[in-house]
Amino acid sequence: LIATNNDLPAKYIFKNKIPIRVIAERAFAGRKQLRSVVIPATVTAIPTAVFYQCENLTDVTIPTTVRSVGNFAFYGCGLLKSAKLPEGLEHIGMGAFYGCANLREQMLGKKIEVLEQGTFYMCRHLKQLPLPEGLRRIDNGVFAGCAELEDIKLPESLEYIGEMAFAGCIVLR
């Protein structure tokens, strides 16, 4: 289990001799000095609000071992440009990337079946996001405010699209 104090370097790399398996919820929340994080391969989940409002965070290295991204994990990380999600990812929580205005492109793992409410809400510069076949549900406001989202192909597996899911998007097909 890891939790942090306010004394963090701009680039945080986990370097403990004991393998980190769990990061505490909100462990890095509000850390304005944090700019870059490398998560170790021993971690399988990014918990709720772990990087909540880390407004200067620009990139996160997420290992292929991560299967879940919790609710509001990167909420308010307005400068976040890179957070490549692993292909084996199975779950992305509500509002996980809410307000990540500088996130430009993202890939979703093939196992994602549900995009929860507000997952990419107000990711204004998000341009590319291929939706995987097998995606069944896009909840309310998932892409609302993604003004630069250019082209979304809805998979045949899709069963439900919530209210305002694509409000403010340019092109859908």
Image: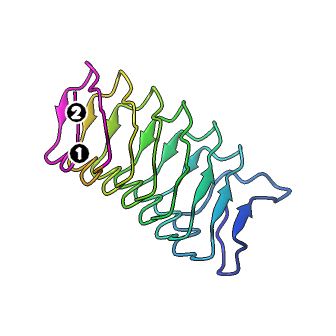
- Please state the extent of the stretch shown in magenta in the rendering: 148-173
Question: Up-down: is 37 above or below 151?
Answer: below
Q: Secondary structure at mark 1?
A: loop
What residue is drawn where x is 57% and y is 60%? Answer: 58
Q: Which residue is mark 1?
A: 169
Q: Amino acid at mark 2?
A: Leu
Q: Residue at x 66, y 73 (%)?
A: 4
Q: Amino acid at mark 1?
A: Cys
On the rendered image, what quadrant is the N terminus found in? Answer: bottom right
Dominant SS type (magenta): loop
The image shows residue 104, relative to residue 136, as above or below, that is: below
The residue pinned by badge 2 equals: 172
Give the CA distance from mark 2 to mark 1: 8 Å
The percent position of residue 72, horizontal first and vertical second, equals 41, 59
Question: How far from the left and from the top, in percent, is residue 136?
Answer: 27, 28
Mark 2 and mark 1 residues within 8 Å of each other at the beta carbon: yes
